Image: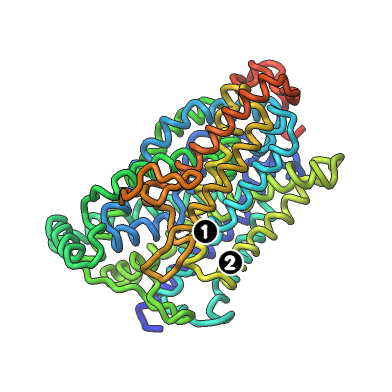
Amino acid sequence: MTGGQVVELIVFSVLFVGVAVMGFLASRWKRGDTMEHLDEWGLGGRKFGGWITWFLVGGDLYTAYTFVAVPALVFSSGALGFYALPYTVVLYPIVFLPVLRLWSVSRANGYVTPADFVRGRYSSPTLALLVAITGIVATMPYIALQLVGLEAVLRTMGINGSGIVGHLPLFVAFLVLALYTFQSGLRAPALIAFVKDSLIYIVIIVAVIYLPSKLGGWSHIFDTAQAKFDASESKADGILLTGNNQLQYATLALGSALALFLYPHSATGILASKSRNTIKKNMIALPAYSFLLGLLALLGFAAIAAGTKPVTNNATGRPDSNTIIPALFDGQFPDWFAGVAYAAIGIGALVPAAIMSIAAANLWTRNIYKEYIAKHATPKQEAKQAKWASLVVKFGAVAFILFVDPQFSIDLQLIGGVIILQTLPAVAIALYTRWLHSRALIAGWVVGMAWGLYLLYTIPNPANGKLHFGGSALSLGELSIFGWHPFSGSTIQIYVGIVALVANMVVAVVVTVVLRAMKAREGRDLTRGEDFHVDEGDAGLREVAT
């Protein structure tokens, strides 16, 4: 470890310890009468206002891995990496109205998870169980990817050993995270998000002003990037999209936008808001993070102009592409400011990891433990179960890093987007209509999930020699429907998640028509029309933590 890395580590450690202390103190912040209730531990008392929600949801959606992976993708593949920008722009208009309805019906009925809503809407424990399991499975690799981002920072600072010893700092960081989340619940990441997002804004704004002045301006940066891609063997790379990847870019952006608020951690941030008006303001203001993300993505081109090389992972002996941005900061900024940047990314891992583990714990407690194991569990027992489940989820994510190649966990996250999309009919569409039959939704989920996973299995990745699960982009020529290739020979690519979702919807509609014609019985709808419009302060509204 060099002298500069020591300075970086000291600055990183001071800021990291500071937010850890905030995490433990958060249990007293805006605390209700008890923490022994999921409304309080898992949803922060359902009373977060505009600023808190903005930082919480922003800290939840724009993760450490986002800030590491997006510019790294731009560095390696060029324009395709900018898909994250339109996806986070179109996201908020798409979800503006649905999240208001989800908040209202959840507030009216005491729902803590999207699966709770599905259970009440259809009186179908099976459908609710599928939604809950889907949410947990899709979230686990997402948490692991926060560790990938944190390890990229530690590796750049010289903590780059192999075996268990090399992961020791990561263990310590997540042990601290586990403890303060266990004690403070959702209040911990909500409070820490203020620090995380403030640091991120400072670092990125300074970077996009300082780096171009040092590297010859943006014109030179773009020219250097284009020269690199022109010289590469892959003609799909470049600062502009090609004819083959434009459809992939559009469908990946749309699919990611549709998927994001289906993730349980995204819904958790929304349900913790105190009113519909709070959510409206946030849907309008959150695109500010998209502007930040666009600036951040440009740093991938800056890293090309700076001649940045990824740090070699001593555990695998291969360059770690996730270290591109930390390595850029290390080479271009003073050591103390690089330490601040690393802290921003490291803290940026803790906030979403905490929210994700809480959301997964809520799903386990409400929709599996209480539904199938302890039907008469008290609110106190639910809260206790969720606390312990959140610990299991965190250490399960650590196990991903220990026993699974980090590159494979990245692929799992891509798979996670395809998986969570299959809950859209049961959750998002059900917010507006109950016409789709619960059994048809189950059939659609099965078909969409099976076909999506099969298509993902058929996708290779020549870059790393993987024959299966090599990405989420499918050539239309490879699309087969019972042996029929409707786009035979086409090299245009499309996002698998959209293909699987279309299959899901078609099956759900067809099976519903058949079941309606057969007059098949349907479970009772426990929600009421007015539930989808209630707001805080309405007469007769259920009290929080009852």
| Quarter occupied by residue 153 | bottom left
* Residue on which disc 1 sits: 412
Image quadrant containing the N terminus: bottom left
Q: Say above or below: 106 vs 257.
A: above
User: Could you tell me which residue is drawn at 66 percent across and 27 percent down?
Assistant: 437
Of residue 198 and residue 372, the one placed in the foreground of this image is 372
Is residue 217 left or right of 456 when viewed as pictured? left
Q: Say above or below: 383 vs 411.
A: above
Badge 2 density bin: few <14, some 14–19, many ≥20, Cα 10 Å:
many
User: Could you tell me which residue is drawn at 69 percent across and 22 percent down?
Assistant: 527
Q: Amino acid at mark 2?
A: Phe
| Quarter occupied by residue 531 | top right
x then y, percent, for residue 169: 55, 74
**3D distance between C-alphas at marks 2 and 1:** 10 Å
Which numbered tag is attached to residue 331?
A: none
x then y, percent, for residue 287: 37, 38
User: Could you tell me which residue is drawn at 28 percent across and 68 percent down?
Assistant: 333
Q: Are the residues tagged 2 and 1 within 8 Å (C-beta)?
A: yes
Badge 1 density bin: few <14, some 14–19, many ≥20, Cα 10 Å:
many
Say how many tags the image has: 2
Residue 285 in sight here: yes
User: Could you tell me which residue is drawn at 39 percent across and 42 percent down?
Assistant: 486
Q: Secondary structure at mark 1?
A: helix
x then y, percent, for residue 247: 32, 43
* Residue on which disc 2 sits: 400
x then y, percent, for residue 332: 26, 69
